[in-house]
Amino acid sequence: KAGVTQTPRYLIKTRGQQVTLSCSPISGHRSVSWYQQTPGQGLQFLFEYFSETQRNKGNFPGRFSGRQFSNSRSEMNVSTLELGDSALYLCASSFYTDTQYFGPGTRLTVL
Amino acid sequence: TQLLEQSPQFLSIQEGENLTVYCNSSSVFSSLQWYRQEPGEGPVLLVTVVTGGEVKKLKRLTFQFGDARKDSSLHITAAQPGDTGLYLCAGASGGSYIPTFGRGTSLIVHP
């Protein structure tokens, strides 16, 4: 089976812009989670989608949003980018368990 | 809030040495995962342990889940430069599918 894929791998944006990241889970996985990883904070949970519904949400501002499509692919959107949003954004999929399989991540740099 | 404490935070050793990384919590986990992450990439799942006292071996890596399912250890025998990376433990509890991640142990193995 193909693994989790994320696009794009790298992004450079300026403050105030918005960005959309895409994630395709492992075939058959219906749960998709998003994480933000920074050197200072480690891996922080953003939100999880299951069958097109947001099932869990982390403690991030409303500028961070997501959605999931009927084919389980997911997108994450960050509006009004801030310098502190620079991070590695990771998508993970799972199949009815808490074992998560991660994609390679999208490195976002906000200038 | 569940907390997973990993120790040590950093480890720099010579090729051929043995090492142990610890993951501790006050929460009981239904299962616990170990991941290895290389710079700029997503975490790669190494193992999932589910039964208290369980020991799993993956070549030179030995994983143990504590009897009370609150802690785990990862032991590497005869470390090699290819073992270099960030080792993360993660666990979920209370019926949640969303795991909590430790801050990780950064391992460098010098040739």
Image: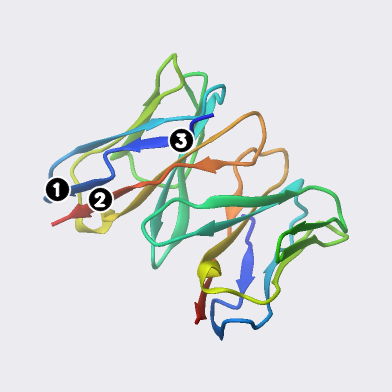
Is residue A97 visible in this depiction of the protein?
yes
Q: Which label's residue is closer to the chain start, 2 or 3?
A: 3
Do the residues bearing badges 2 and 3 touch, measured as CB atoms within 8 Å? no
Do the residues bearing badges 1 and 3 touch, measured as CB atoms within 8 Å? no
| Kind of element beneath mark 3 | loop
Quadrant the C terminus of chain A occupies: bottom left
Q: Nearer the viewer, residue A57 or A111?
A: A111
Q: Is A67 positioned to the left or the right of A80 in the image?
A: right
Viewer-nearest of discs 1 and 3: 3
Mark 1 vs mark 3: tell me if same chain.
yes
Question: To which residue does mark 3 refer?
Answer: A4
Q: Residue at x 85, y 55 (%)?
A: B54
Question: To which residue does mark 2 refer?
Answer: A108
Viewer-nearest of discs 2 and 3: 3
| Kind of element beneath mark 1 | strand
Quadrant the N terminus of chain A occupies: top right
